[in-house]
Image (cartoon, rainbow, N blue to C red):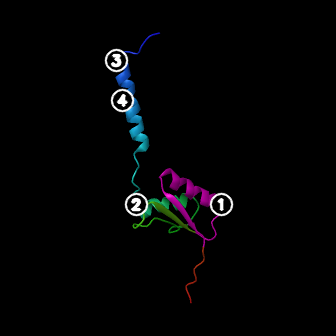
C-alpha cells in the first residue's frame, strides 16, 4: 500500500477548496437591458414589453401575458432559470377604463 506524496495531498486539498468555493459563491442578479429582454421576448414568440425585470427586485423576471402558450412560458422560464432569476408569470387582463 502506497501513501500519497505530500505534493499530491496538498494539490488535492487545494483543488477541493477551490471547487467548494465556486459551488457556494452566489452570483448577484443583474438588471438586464430593455433590448436584452426584447430579444428574449422575440425569441420566445412574445411581444416587446411582455418580459420585464424591475430595478427594485432584480432577482425576479416577470412575464405579463394573458394569452401566452405553454411553449412561450416554458421558453421564458428556462431563460430566467439559466440566469438564476425567479420566474413570475402574471396572467391577468387589465382594463384601461373603470
Look at the numbered discs 4 and 1 and tell me whether their residues touch, using CB distance below 8 Å.
no
The crowding category of the residue bearing disc 4, from other C-alpha atoms within 10 Å (few below 14, some 14 to 19, many at least 20), is: few
Q: CA distance from mark 3 to mark 2?
A: 46 Å
Mark in front: 1 vs 3: 3
In magenta stretch: residue 2: no
Element type at mark 1: helix
Q: Which mark is residue 6?
A: 3
The crowding category of the residue bearing disc 1, from other C-alpha atoms within 10 Å (few below 14, some 14 to 19, many at least 20), is: few
The crowding category of the residue bearing disc 3, from other C-alpha atoms within 10 Å (few below 14, some 14 to 19, many at least 20), is: few
Mark in front: 3 vs 2: 3
In magenta stretch: residue 89: yes
Which mark sits nearer the N-terminus, 3 or 2? 3
- Residue annotated with mark 1: 70
- Residue annotated with mark 4: 14
The span picked out in magenta is: 65-91
**Residue depicted at x 42% and y 44%:** 24
Q: CA distance from mark 4 to mark 1?
A: 46 Å
Q: Is residue 43 left or right of residue 8?
A: right
- Residue annotated with mark 2: 31
Q: Position of residue 28 (x, y in %)?
A: 39, 54
Which mark sits nearer the N-terminus, 4 or 1? 4
Which mark sits nearer the N-terminus, 4 or 2? 4
Q: Is residue 69 left or right of residue 87?
A: right
In front of the other: 66 or 7: 7
**Residue depicted at x 37% and y 19%:** 8
The crowding category of the residue bearing disc 2, from other C-alpha atoms within 10 Å (few below 14, some 14 to 19, many at least 20), is: some
Amino acid at each position: 500500500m502506497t501513501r500519497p506524496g505530500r505534493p499530491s495531498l496538498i494539490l488535492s486539498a487545494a483543488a477541493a477548496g477551490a471547487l467548494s468555493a465556486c459551488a457556494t459563491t452566489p452570483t448577484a442578479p443583474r438588471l438586464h437591458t430593455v433590448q436584452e429582454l426584447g430579444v428574449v421576448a422575440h425569441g420566445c414568440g412574445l411581444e416587446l414589453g411582455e418580459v420585464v425585470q424591475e430595478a427594485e427586485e432584480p432577482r425576479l423576471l416577470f412575464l405579463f401575458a394573458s394569452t401566452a402558450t405553454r411553449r412561450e412560458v416554458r421558453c421564458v422560464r428556462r431563460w430566467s432559470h439559466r440566469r438564476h432569476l425567479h420566474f413570475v408569470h402574471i396572467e391577468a387582463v387589465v382594463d384601461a377604463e373603470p
